[in-house]
Structures are given as C-alpha cells and as structure tokens.
Image (spheres, coloured by chain):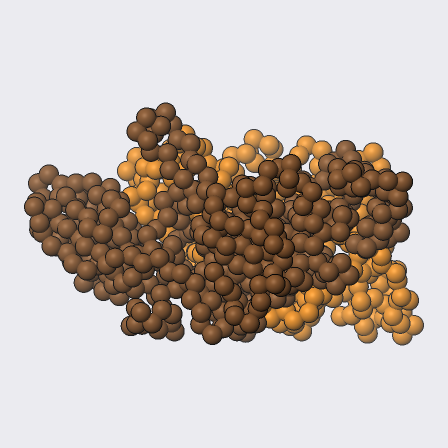
Chain colours: A brown, B orange
Amino acid sequence: MPTKPEQGAEQALIDVSGLHVRYALRRGPLARITGGGGVIRAVDGVSFQLRRGEVLGLVGESGSGKSTLGRALLGLVPASSGSIRYAGTELVGRSERRMRPLRRRLQMVFQDPHASLNPAMDVGTAVGHPLRIHGVAGKDVRDRVVEALELVGLSPAHRYLSLRPGDLSGGQKQRVVIARATILGPELLVADEPVSMLDMSVRAKILRLMLDLRQQLNLTYLYITHDLATAKLFCDRVAIMYLGRIVEIGRTDEVFADPKHPYTRALLAAIPDLRPEHAGPRDVPAGEIPDAARPPAGCSYHPRCPHAFAPCGFEGRDLRALLEARWGRDEPGTAAGSTADLAAESARFADLDDFLVHSERIRIRPARGHTAADVLQTLSAARTDAPDEPVWRGVRAMAVEDHAAVVEFEPATDPGLLDTGTARVACHLFDPRFAPAEQVS
Amino acid sequence: MTTPSPVSTAVPTGEPRVRVRDLRIWYGTSGAPVRAVDGVDLTIHAGQIVALVGESGCGKTTLGRGILGLLPPAAATDGEVVVDGTDLLRLPARRLRAMRGDKLGLVFQEPMTRLDPLMRVGDHFDELLRTHRPRLSRAERERQAVDILRAMGIPASRLRQYPHEFSGGMRQRIMIALTLVLRPALVVADEPTTALDVLVEAQILKILAELRSSVDCGMLLITHNLGIVLEAADRVAVMYAGRIVEEGDVRQVFAHPAHPYTRELLRSTISLTTTELHHIPGSPPDLADPPPGCRFHPRCPDAMRICPNSDPGDVDTAGGQRVACWLHRLDEVAPADREPLPDREISVADEA
C-alpha cells in the first residue's frame, strides 16, 4: 500500500506491507478435541514506511499490538505473513542465522532499563557485549566502549566501566542501554517505551539524548509509546494503533492539530492538562480495548465509538452490552420505571449468550413462561429509552419469527486507510461511499 | 466505630479525619540512619483527596505506608498519626490490625494480582463484610456490595463472575470498591492507575473525582504523575527528600507554584502544551546524608547563599500554600545571604 505519493519508495529504510503476526491460542483439551483453538491477530495487516532519518511514533494502548509490531521488525517475533523490507532486503521468513548479521543495523531499546541489564555484568562488559557477539571485537573494544559511553553522556567513561547496574540510577541505566544499542552503529533503533519507567524529571533528558544521537549517528527511530505527549515532541510522524491495526497515520503536526479518527481524539482528550484553567471534566469513552481473540466485527473501535454508524460492524454483543448497561444503571430508570423493573427484564431472555452468535442475523429466544413478543418488546423499549445509542444505527430490523425475536444488523465493512489530504485514517466517517450522515463534531 | 460524618463541602470544617504531625520514619543501616520521612505534617478532611507527589526515592510510598502502620519491623517512627481521634503510632499492634479495613484502607498499584482468582467477585465482598460487619444479613451484605460496585460502574449482574473475567480497569475499580465498602476514615491509594492505560486511567480518575462528594473518607493519592493530580485531587503535597516542601490547593499550586522544586517539576512534566524539553539537573539526595539547609539547594536554580546554611522551615504564602523556601522569607534574610549561590557543576554522574 503506498504512503503519500510525494515520498518516493527509494527513501524508505523499512517498508512494511500487509504484515500479520498471529499467535495460536492454546486452550484446554476439550477445545483441542472440538477444534476451538483460535488465533490472536496481534498485528493484523499493517503497512507503513519508515523513511531514513525520521522518527515514527507508534502509539497505542496495551494490547494494541505496537510492541509486537516493533519486535516483528527486528525478527524477534516471526511474522505470519506479509513483507518487511529493510533497504530492499526481505526480512520475513529469514532464518535466525541469516537474521543475525542484520541485527547490527537494527537495534532495540526496551522499556525497563532495570531488567535490560544483567545485574552481575559491569557496564564496560555489557556495552562491549554486542561487539563480541558479532565478532567485531578486537584490541580496541575498550576504546569503542569508552567512546559509546561518552556519546550517551556517561562521562568520564572510566568512572562507569566497572560499575554494575545496581550502582546506577534509572536514567543512567537507560543511557547504558542506549550505548549498548548504538555501539554497533545501527541504522534503525526500535525504542519501546524508553522513558516510561523513568521519573518525569529525567524523561526530558533521555529524549534529548535520543534526538542528539539521531543527528550524530544518522539514526532512524521507531518510537513505541502509549504517551501521546512525548510522541508529539519527539516524532516526525505518528501512527495510532488499535487492536492490531493502524487507524491513523500522518505527520505529527497534522495529527495533533486535526485528529481525525475518533480513537485518536479520545486518546488526546484523555491526556491531563497541567493548566488549571483548562482542567475539567472530559469525555472519556467507555469500555476498554477488546479481547484480541474475539475482535469486534468491522471497525474494532466501534463498540466504544460515539460516532459509529451503520457500516461500522454492529453485532449481537453490542446489543447485549447495551442491555446490561441498562439493567445495571445506577439511578432508577426514567421512562421504563425503577431499576428493579429494568433488572426484571433480563428474566425474559432464555440465554443472553444468544447475542454472541457471530452473524448479521441473530435469534433471541424467550425464557420459559415468556414469549418472543416479550423479548421484542424489551428490545423496543431499550431502543425507545435510548434512541441515540450508536448501536441502533446498526440495527436494520427486529421482528418476531419462529418463536424468537430476530435482530438483523447492517453488514459490517472493514475500514481501510483512506487519504484525507493530510493524515490517512481508517474510519468510515471519511469514506464518501457511506455518506456518513453524522460528521465528527 | 463512629458514625460517618456528613458529606463534605468545598471548604472542609471541623476536625480532620487524618492529622499527621511531625512524622519521622527512619531505617537503621550499617552507616547513618536513612531518614525516609523527616518531619511531615499533613491534614486530610472527610471527602478530600490529597495528592502526594515527588520523584522516586523521595519517601512518598514510605509516608503512605507509615500512615497506615504498614512499615517493616526495621523502621522506626516518631510523631503522631491521628485518625478519627486515635493516634495510630501509640496503638498496640493488635488494635492497629483491628483498625485496618474498618478505618484504614489501601489501594495497590497492580489490580491484576490482588484479587483471589478462585473467588467470585461477590464472594470477595461477602468475606470482607462477614469479617468486619458480622451482624449484617447475607442480603444486606450483597446489597452493600451491589451499591458500591454500581457506584464504580460495574453492573450487579457481574457479581457472580471471577476476577479473570474482568479487564484491568474493572479489576482496579473492584479493588477500590472493596476498600470503600467498609467506609474507612482514610484510604491510601499508591499509584492506583500507573499500571493502566491512559483511557482507563481517565475513567478511574473520573470515578474517584465523582466519589469525593458522596464518600466521607479522606484519601491520600500517591503518584509521580502530576497530570492526574489536577484532575483528581483537592490538595497537593509535594515531597522532596523526605520532607513536604509545598502543600496547598491543587489549582493554586499548579497556577502559582511557590517552591522552586514544584515549579521545576511542573516544567519538566511533558504535556501536550510542552514545546521544549526541560529537566531538573542532578538527582534526589542520599537520605542517609542529605544536604544541609534546604535539601533542594544543590539542584535549585534560585539557590541563595543562605540556602545551604539554614533550613527555611514552613511559611504560609499569600496564596494559601504552605511552603518551605527562603524566597518566601526574604525579609528575614540579610542582603549578603540573598546573593545567588556560585555556579555548581552538576554532571550526568549525579543524574537520576
């Protein structure tokens, strides 16, 4: 998939195309007999380019697949399908033995500097270790270690050579980790949350160091983070990930000035403001990132999205979530009576798991002593009480049929990345085919 | 057990639920004692959330544990921690233990590991209430559990589910509900949202902020994240090297920080409006051998000649903050002592 037309492919250091990383789920013996194993699509069809010398931010919550994607770039987790080209060389499917020489050029900095360093290994040995592993050790190992340490600001280096990680502060440890990652002269550094374990007072210093190193060593960064605020300062472009997919990608200034995807907007709104005059109640989307083993149909964000509409992929479990919220509501109901009355509604359903059937047409059976009409009446009441709930935009019809209430949903469409003139967004609101009735506010 | 006091108003009046006075906590080592908490005063009223912020190693977690009497045996304490009229530091261990749960609650950082995976969520509440409120009927126990869970946004229909069926954010809400269901006088929440995602963190902070008006306990929210303080807390105490250097109304402190450390901490916090990177040079001192005078002076951009020589003590500012800084007692400082401290070299070697 091409990125913006003005950027030529020859500039791409890394070209990722249609990348999938799947993990097989191992369930109990029963599931093995019945064949219900399932897969987790940790990275689900991702394409982007990393240009030489740029900093690309990969932003998302835990479970979004951002770390898996970063590791897949270095071959630390095997890609299931798709392509990762590094300066024209295909990395997917490469054996570990053939991958290893490339790791000199592709390095990684992990989140936890305390866990990244062997507590029994002194700083000099740790930083020189990559040289030995890659067989480039010589008489000048010590000189190169000293040089690497000075470069990351641990100066004078001889003071640090014989220290162990336990003698260092968090910021100093992360500097050692960065020295170790840069000593082989890499082109790409994948930095997975490099500052999130550090105190606020130190984060800025490590980010400054990384920016300086980018200049001095001509580095390209993939900066993986959950923190949009540091991404805004640090990155040239950002890609927002949700449940294994990139939902928005574009230049940092454009994405922050005019966030398009409702998820990007929610993430931005969730960042606390330090200015008292701007602090106040904020709109926070309900719910959490869904289980990747059973991703929602259509757009994965639709169950939490206030703007979701017909093509976004509404299904039975969205309706069930709405009913459960209705029955569990704190204040006594307004139109439909008290909480107790609402809770009594749940007794009309034979099995709430009827809603979980993965289909555009689901049959909801009444409990013993109730009729299909009771069930339909409950669903209709829920609709009347909350007609603006997005899920109703996805319900095409509800009727009684063959002793059950049948709910028919609009067909789901997977959103692909669309060009909007600035950032590229995977959201139907920006797809003229769907003529989204309601624009993003 | 006293009856809960009425819902608090914006300006708390009357006896605070928690009053900490000149609390000192130190650990004996082979060398000098490590003074993790060194003369802390703190007051928490009913319905108030007081945030305790500072860098790692400043003593904020020790202070939180110390207030609950949860320190390791090697720790020595001095001072007063008065909760609803009882000084916890003078209580025999057995009576202190009896106060836990009833009067004192703790919310941990990782919600994933604090619930029993083999117990239904409802049973967690049942067991807790059976232990602490033996006279309640089974129906009444369930009603209280349902009420508090609803307030935290968890539907009653999920009472029969097991912890693994809940997401991380839901589990932390259950943990908070388990603490609040006994209506304790004081809840210490130690980085309650640090392990959670940004959106989930925002959800929980919103719930905490809403609970303030309906719950009559005092809460101490320990965090290193200044961003969430403004949102969730009423007052903030900034801790540095075992001492509280500034304390006051959250909005006032954020708008007009009185202590240079507070100001620098706010400047170095990266938010969406940050345009350049800023950091505080140097690192927090070794608490076994803290600098003389004001402990922040080696890192302070405003340090004067008097700062290393004399401890400023607390002053109240016009804005209502309590601050420990000579800048707010300038009229007591001789002109020669107001001269800036000569340039001090702080190398990366001393960085945090």
Could you tell me which residue is drawn at 51 percent across and 65 percent down?
Answer: A3
Q: Observer-nearest residue: B63 or A248? A: A248
> In the figure, A138 relative to B48: above or below?
above
Could you tell me which residue is drawn at 16 percent across and 46 percent down?
Answer: A363
Could you tell me which residue is drawn at 33 percent across and 33 percent down?
Answer: A36
Q: Position of residue B293 (x, y in %)?
A: 84, 58
Q: Observer-nearest residue: B258 or A290? A: A290
**Quadrant hosting residue B248:** bottom right
Q: Position of residue A258 (x, y in %)?
A: 49, 73
Left or right: A292 as drawn, with respect to A376: right
Could you tell me which residue is drawn at 54 percent across and 41 percent down?
Answer: A93
Q: Position of residue B230 (x, y in %)?
A: 56, 64
Residue B97 visible from this viewpoint:
yes
**Quadrant hosting residue A202:** bottom right
**Quadrant hosting residue A338:** bottom left
Q: Observer-nearest residue: A281 or A129? A: A129
Total marks shown come to 0
Q: Position of residue A208 (x, y in %)?
A: 72, 62
Residue B224 visible from this viewpoint:
no
Left or right: A137 as drawn, with respect to A206: right
Q: Observer-nearest residue: A122 or B248? A: A122
Left or right: A306 as drawn, with respect to B193: left
